[in-house]
Image (cartoon, rainbow, N blue to C red):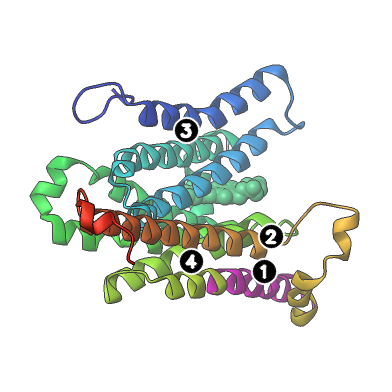
């Protein structure tokens, strides 16, 4: 059962994640039933399911860094569940594309071949589905842990293709794709650092947080420059202009990415302090003799 752990017992963590994973689908179903969507409900669900697929991919990729940063091994129990949620929203997205195209298969195939953003989305989907199909104990055993891990680094390629697919048709709404792209840069940096340096030090974590924020601002400015010919530096510098906060609470995505990176840094710092305190208390003698506790004269 999705809410039971490997020991077969009810897991509150898995149950909570399961509820969170199905909540967006329930919300979409409710909006559909109540007629709360726009006059083009199929397009709405197509977009919303794509958004949720992308968000779950980011959450799945954040699990391993979180596990190492917080030394929270139990969190790994929810990674597969979150992966299934991402695959579910991808398939929902694809199904609504089929509905949108009235199941005219020749036209669907032609569109995927001739429209670059669809071709890219299709390749991303194939990689994600291949990874989902090999995400079980039997396949890990069959491939061996090292080969399985190497194969699963492809998730970053698939995530990159998915974000390109996202950017290629958002037009003016580049806020969320920029945010997600920045988070992906940050998660890839954690992974690379752990692979080549082992531990992530506090300094490295601060550096990666800043890199994430900066990449987000650069990606956003690059997108507007490329798609709308907007002045690159003006968009980039708008990250430092807080005067608009008077009218709207919309903070630029770069700041959210920086905040996420600093939160991660805080987790590493907290763990280091906790480790230091435990080491100190375990090295202290269990009891003190009278002479030890007596004040020095
Ligand atoms: C065969 C594969 C795919 C097809 C045919 C497809 C089709 C589409 C189409 C037609 C749109 C534009 C909707 C519109 O604005 O009218 C779209 C948007 C989108 N797709 Fe895909 N897609 C595919 C794969 C994927 C994958 C693998 C992901 C992510 C994991 C994804 C995420 C998104 C996102 C985030 C959007 C933007 C939604 C928005 O505007 O808010 N797609 N897709």
Q: Are marks 4 and 3 in contact (CB under 8 Å)?
A: no
Q: Which mark is residue 163?
A: none
Comes first in the chain, label 1 or label 3? 3
Comes first in the chain, label 2 or label 3? 3
Q: What residue would you read off at disc 2?
A: 174
**Label 1 Cα neighbours within 10 Å, binned few <14 / some 14-19 / many ≥20:** many
Badge 4 marks a residue whose secondary structure is helix
Q: What residue would you read off at disc 3?
A: 21
**Point 44% across, 38% down: residue:** 91
Q: Are marks 2 and 1 in contact (CB under 8 Å)?
A: yes
**Point 54% across, 74% down: residue:** 211
Comes first in the chain, label 2 or label 1? 2
Q: What residue would you read off at disc 4?
A: 186
Left or right, 232 with reference to 95: right
Q: Which residue range is magenta in the image? A: 211-231
* In front of the other: 28 or 109: 28
Report the predominant secondary structure element of the magenta stretch: helix
């Amino acid at each position: 059962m999705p809410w039971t752990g490997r020991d077969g017992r009810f897991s509150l963590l898995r149950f909570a994640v399961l509820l969170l994973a199905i909540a967006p689908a329930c919300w979409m179903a409710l909006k559909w039933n109540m007629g709360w969507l726009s006059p083009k409900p199929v397009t709405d669900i197509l977009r919303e399911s794509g958004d949720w697929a992308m968000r779950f991919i980011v959450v799945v990729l954040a699990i391993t860094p979180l596990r190492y940063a917080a030394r929270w091994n139990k969190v790994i129990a929810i990674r597969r569940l979150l992966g299934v949620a991402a695959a579910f929203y991808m398939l929902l997205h694809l199904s609504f594309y089929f509905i949108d195209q009235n199941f005219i298969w020749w036209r669907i195939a032609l569109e995927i071949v001739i429209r670059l953003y669809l071709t890219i989305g299709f390749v991303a989907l194939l990689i994600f589905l291949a990874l989902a199909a090999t995400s079980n104990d039997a396949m890990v055993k069959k491939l061996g842990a090292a080969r399985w891990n190497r194969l699963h680094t492809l998730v970053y390629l698939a995530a990159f293709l998915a974000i390109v697919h996202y950017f290629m048709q958002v037009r003016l709404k580049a806020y969320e794709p920029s945010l997600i792209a920045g988070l992906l840069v940050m998660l890839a940096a954690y992974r690379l650092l752990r692979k080549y340096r082992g531990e992530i030090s506090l300094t490295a974590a601060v550096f990666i947080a800043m890199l994430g924020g900066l990449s987000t601002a650069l990606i956003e400015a690059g997108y507007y420059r490329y798609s709308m010919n907007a002045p690159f530096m003006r968009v980039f510098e708008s990250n430092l202009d807080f005067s608009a906060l008077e009218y709207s609470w919309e903070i630029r995505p770069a700041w959210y990415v920086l905040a996420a990176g600093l939160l991660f840094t805080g987790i590493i710092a907290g763990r280091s302090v906790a480790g230091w305190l435990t080491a100190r208390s375990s090295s202290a003698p269990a009891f003190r003799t009278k002479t030890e506790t007596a004040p020095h004269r």
